Amino acid sequence: MTPDAWLLLGVVALLLTAWTAWTLTRLRRLEARVARARAVLEDRLRQRAALAEDLVSLHGAALGEDRAGRLKTAAYEARATPAGDRELAENALGRELRALPAEVPGVPRALLADLAEAEARMGLARRFYNDAVRDTALLRTRRLPRLLRLHADRPLPRFFDVEDGLDAVTTGAGASG
């Protein structure tokens, strides 16, 4: 091989090494972003379930026995369900919360407003988490990272899909407290 060919090969190897290092750094940052977003989402889900449990324990009679029972069960299952069934449990809790009237006699408006705010924050946290998962998946499934097996030993993060009324929140047409 000629010296020019060795130089060209060296430049290509250097560029590939630089790109690989940059991509690995980006993948690590995306992984950290997913972890932070998941922690915030978990916190928002716990907060929403705790507020629902407070509503039932403090004002169960005002809600009615049937609705209070369904809400208590949904809140308990949302907090105690393993990861695989979590989305189903969160959907059930969300449906029960959205079925509440805007005003319930005997229930402070502040508590209902806190529940509506918790629902909105959970929806936004879910959106940030799913955006981080999407960005990670897009980078990891590109041809070159797949070929070089960058982060191949790590599982792809899963999307968290629940019915959260986020469209109503972002357009301003949602529930208000």
Image (tube, helix red, strand yellow):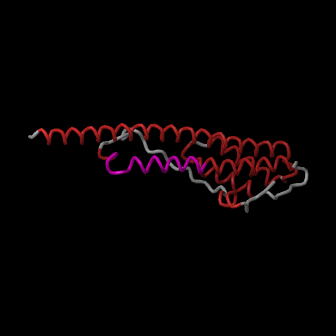
> What's the residue at 79%, 42% (across, down)?
54
Q: Is residue 24 left or right of residue 38?
A: left
Q: Of 141 and 68, which appears nearest the observer? A: 141
Work out which quarter of the rendered image holds the N terminus and state it: top left
> What's the residue at 68%, 48% (across, down)?
121
Query: Looking at the picture, how far across and down is residue 53, in whole percent?
Result: 76, 43
Q: Is residue 142 left or right of residue 52?
A: left
What's the magenta bit mostly, secondary-structure-wise? helix
Work out which quarter of the rendered image holds the C terminus and state it: bottom right
As for residue 143 lying within the magenta part, the answer is yes
As for residue 36 lying within the magenta part, the answer is no
Query: Looking at the picture, how far across and down is residue 51, in whole percent?
Result: 76, 43
Q: Find residue 105 and report its image quarter.
A: bottom right
Q: Bounds of the magenta span?
A: 126-145
Query: Looking at the picture, how far across and down is residue 64, in whole percent?
Result: 84, 54
Query: Looking at the picture, how far across and down is residue 30, in whole percent?
Result: 48, 41
Q: Residue furthest left?
A: 1
Q: Is residue 84 left or right of residue 92?
A: left
Q: Of 150 and 87, which appears nearest the observer? A: 150
Q: Of 35 and 73, which appears nearest the observer? A: 35
Q: Of 91 and 32, which appears nearest the observer? A: 32
> What's the residue at 83%, 52% (across, down)?
65
